[in-house]
Amino acid sequence: MKPPVRFARIVFTAAALLLSLGSLGAAPLKVVSTTGMIDDLVRQVGGDRVTAEALMGPGVDPHLYKATASDVIKLQRAKVIFYNGHHLEGKMGELLARLAKGGRAVCALAETLPADQLLTPAGEAHPDPHVWFDIALWARGVDAVARVLTEADPAGAETYAANAAATRERLVALDAWARAKAAEVPAAQRVLITSHDAYSYFGRAYGFEVVGLQGISTVSEASLAGVARLVDFIRERGIKAIFVESSVPPAMIKRIADDAGVVVGGELFSDAMGTPGQIENGHDLGTYDGMVRHNLNTIVNALK
């Protein structure tokens, strides 16, 4: 016996309503990034359509980081994974490769950037991974983030495109500010000495000669001869200040400062951003914008 027409319509309407509610209540796209800088970019582009999380927090050195059991669970549950690449996350390479083979969307953001814009130090087999310190270059990663999110969530394509455009605009403005701020230091005084060689892209973009005590990875250790050469360099060039980094133990730089008779000009963020919610001059140090502004203000105030 066929059900009454009215009953059939009620069933159809209820089914349609459930489908509609299911669509409206669809869970946000779960995205996990290795570093805070990448996580910040994902949040800017993803907006409300994603739940974003970074594995490495303030003060964490990605060169030496080992994934914990809880990290592995987070990565396995993520729909999309972003990491830097070019061996920044040295000890996580095999894990990320396995996850990529398992069918997840895994993107090495620095490896999407134009190869001719990357720097490869002498004696290194791969490019310098610290690409985020050239703001204009970092902005070119916005398209990759939007593309990967759209592939995983096609319904959000318009949102991702609009957010990506707004993010690029903000980064262009930040880059212009950075160039103007760097110009406050006379060109002859733009010498940046830090714990490890993380600022080569920064130096190229904003006109600084950069000298790192360690190489591009903190896995390498500074030799006594290297320490002595750096002390001599500081004295010969009349450097006013050198800098420690938030993710690298400061003892060696402080020793060099004492030996060379210079001050430690402050602490810079290199491979990790600051603590979210920590405000300095109206900017959150736990954001990319806040990190960049803190670094430049610290460098310029100490060197000029």
Image (spheres, grey):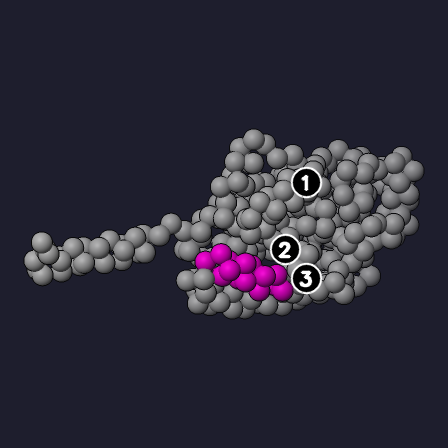
* Residue 68 rendering spot, x and y as whole percentages: 59, 32
- At a point 53% along the width and 33% down the height, the residue shown is 70
Residue 104 lies, in percent from the top left, at 55, 48
* Mark 2 and mark 1: Cα distance apart in space: 17 Å
* Residue under label 3: 113
Asked if labels 3 and 2 touch by Cβ distance under 8 angstroms, the answer is yes
The answer to whether residue 210 is left or right of residue 146 is right
Element type where label 2 sits in the image: helix
Give the number of the mark in front: 2 or 1.
Answer: 1
Say which residue label 1 marks.
94
Whichever of callouts 1 and 3 sits on the residue coming sooner in the sequence is 1
Between residues 238 and 283, which one lies in front from this camera angle? 283
In 3D space, how far apart are the residues under numbered discs 1 and 3 (Cα atoms)?
22 Å
SS assignment at label 3? loop
Which sits in the foreground, 115 or 95? Answer: 95
- Residue at image point 76% right, 40% down: 218
What segment is highlighted magenta in the picture?
A: 139-153
Q: Which of the pair 163/31 is nearer the observer? A: 31
Residue 180, label in figure: none
143 in magenta: yes
Q: Where is residue 240 in the image (x, y as percent from the top left)?
A: 79, 50
